[in-house]
Amino acid sequence: MHVVYAGNPTRSGTPMQSTRYKGYLLWGHAIPDENRYAASVTITRESKVIEVSGILAHFMTETEAEIAGLQWATAWVDNN
């Protein structure tokens, strides 16, 4: 997995992990929300947005949120 940032890679950027899976590029997001991180995911294919999850759940760490997003995304790909 790769850690990238939405926009400018600064403290104000939203950290996310990305991975390729069955021809899709999955982006697991960790969105700061008070003292927690909201998990969400964006699924793309050939530079086109295919699916956006919305908020999936809240986690105590960025990594937990990103991984949860990627797990949701792999399940989505497997079922669609």
Image (tube, grey):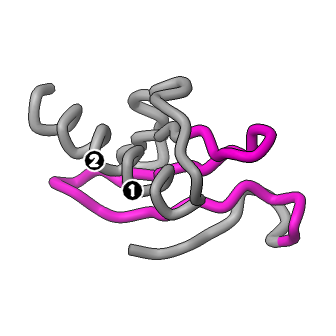
Give the residue pinned by disc 2. Answer: 71
Is residue 34 found inside the magenta-colored segment of the image?
A: yes
Give the left or right position of residue 38, taking residue 19 as reference.
right
Residue at 22% in and 32% down? 76
Give the residue pinned by disc 1. Answer: 67
Whether the residues at callouts 1 and 2 have beta carbons within 8 Å, the answer is: yes
**Viewer-proximal residue among 30 and 80:** 30
- Mark 1 lies on a secondary structure that is helix
Amino acid beneath label 2: Gln
Give the left or right position of residue 49, taking residue 5 as reference.
left
Res 28 label: none
**Viewer-proximal residue among 12 and 45:** 12
Q: Position of residue 46 (x, y in %)?
A: 39, 49
**Could you tell me which quadrant the N terminus lies in?**
bottom left
Position above or below: 52 against 20: above
Q: Position of residue 21 (x, y in %)?
A: 22, 57
Residue at 35% in and 64% down? 19
Q: Main secondary structure of the magenta part?
A: strand
**Viewer-proximal residue among 64 and 1:** 64
Q: Which residues are magenta?
A: 10-38
